[in-house]
Image: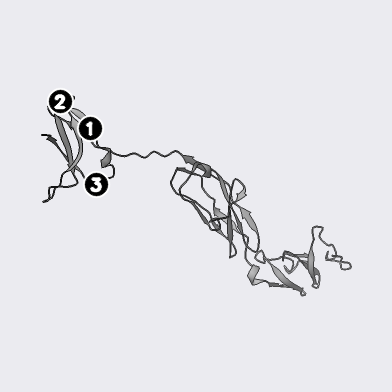
Amino acid sequence: VASYGGGWGESLVPDHLTNIVAVAAGWWHNLTINDKGTITAWGNNNGGQCNVPTNMAFAKAIAGGAWHSLAIIDPSRSGSPPKILAQPANRVAAIGSTVLFTVRCNGGQPISYQWFRNGTNILARATNSIFAIAGLQPSDAGDYSVLLSNSVGTVMSQPATLKVLPSLNVNMVPALRLAGQIGLNYRLEYIGQLSHTDSWQVLTNVVITTNPQLFFDVSAIGQPERLYRLVQSP
């Protein structure tokens, strides 16, 4: 951009202007638009004609009057760049569990999301504000971040660290104290619940070697209820 003449600074072109696609002149001021739709104004500013509003995110055309300026804004690209309001949080979870990473933001819509793990683009299931990992494995550990973008700009979140812990599955197993005559054979029987059918099932046959004698019923894991009885075999 080249400018000359005038006495109110309108000929002093700012040094930072690049990629200019349109120019306009007012009475004592000038305006430009670059390829990103950004307006720059300079010169006499007694009427505020050089004060470009901050919400003019993408201008398509400009014009200058005596004490005012005008701009046409592209509505499809207006708004503000994404701004992160809540960063993804660190997570610690056990193997096999499900973990969620979330980000909260505002800015001009629509906003697109792309999640990364250790700086690498996650292609599948990673284009929303919530990123879920189900059936967690040790290989899923790492730093997760998300890139937010709209027509105005982009912003990358802070990394959130995922630590994967070994899991421990605890099951309660009934411990039975069997009391009988040493050396004799017994049937250990069980039933899910008492009913009119009285359908006792044989769990195992056992010879009493010590009195009392412990027996652990691992087959009862996950059962809501189980009753036992010890019957001497013939």
Q: Mark 1 points at which residue?
A: 215
Residues at marks 3 and 2, CA–CA distance in whole angstroms: 33 Å
- Residue 82 drawn at (x, y percent): 60, 59
| Residue at image point 50% right, 41% down | 138
| 83 with respect to 63 (left or right) | left
Disc number placed over residue 134 in the picture, else none? none
Q: What residue type is labelled 3?
A: Pro
| 167 with respect to 28 (left or right) | left
Q: Name the residue under label 2.
A: 183
| Extreme residue in the right direction | 5
Report whether residue 67 is seen.
no
Q: Mark 3 points at which residue?
A: 224
Q: What residue type is labelled 2?
A: Gly
Residues at marks 2 and 1, CA–CA distance in whole angstroms: 16 Å
Secondary structure of residue under mark 3: loop
Q: Relative to the observer, which residue lies in front, 213 or 51? A: 213
- Residue 4 drawn at (x, y percent): 89, 67
